[in-house]
Image (cartoon, rainbow, N blue to C red):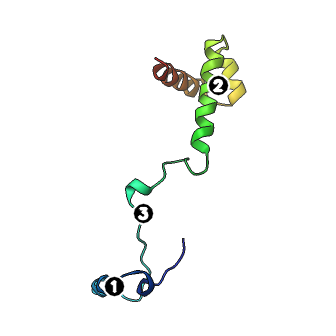
Amino acid sequence: MQYKNAKEVLPPSLLKEMQKYIQGDLIYIPKAKSERAGWGEVSGSRALIAERNEEIFQLYINGKSLEELERKFHLSIDSIRKIIYKMRNNHV
């Protein structure tokens, strides 16, 4: 996050209005919701997990047991089941 002087970025009328509420302090102005990235979209984590889940599902439908998937992916059997259930519903 970068500090910006309001005097340099806001129109004088808006600056004067804001000075009624806050003066000399820092204020954070969040992005509009439509501009916010979802969890893992910027870092790529979301895509990696989606790929992993697809691999788990494909291995399962090709005959791998829940126990084998648990060991390979270091996830609990309950987590593996949830992934398979979700992927099965997405592939219908």
First-in-chain label (2 vs 1): 1
Q: Are marks 2 and 3 in contact (CB under 8 Å)?
A: no
Question: Is residue 49 positioned above or below 56 on the image?
Answer: below
- Name the residue tied to disc 3: 31
Percent x, y of residue 59: 66, 18
Taking 73 as reference, is 88 left or right?
Answer: left
- Name the residue tied to disc 1: 15
- Name the residue tied to disc 2: 55
Q: Amino acid at mark 3?
A: Lys
The local secondary structure at tag 1 comes to helix
Label disc, if present, on residue 67 of the rendered structure: none
Percent x, y of residue 42: 57, 51
Percent x, y of residue 52: 63, 31
Q: Residue at point 30% right, 82% down?
A: 14
Q: Are marks 3 and 1 in contact (CB under 8 Å)?
A: no
Q: Amino acid at mark 2?
A: Glu
Q: What is the distance, in whole Å, between disc 3 and disc 1 at their CAs?
A: 19 Å
The local secondary structure at tag 3 comes to loop
**Disc nearest the viewer among 2 and 3:** 3
Foreground residue, 1 or 84?
1
Q: What is the distance, in whole Å, between disc 2 and disc 1 at their CAs?
A: 54 Å
Foreground residue, 66 or 43?
43
How packed mark 1 is, by other alpha carbons closer than 10 Å (few <14, some 14-19, many 20 or more), is some
Q: Can the viewer see residue 66? A: no
Taking 14 as reference, is 45 left or right?
Answer: right
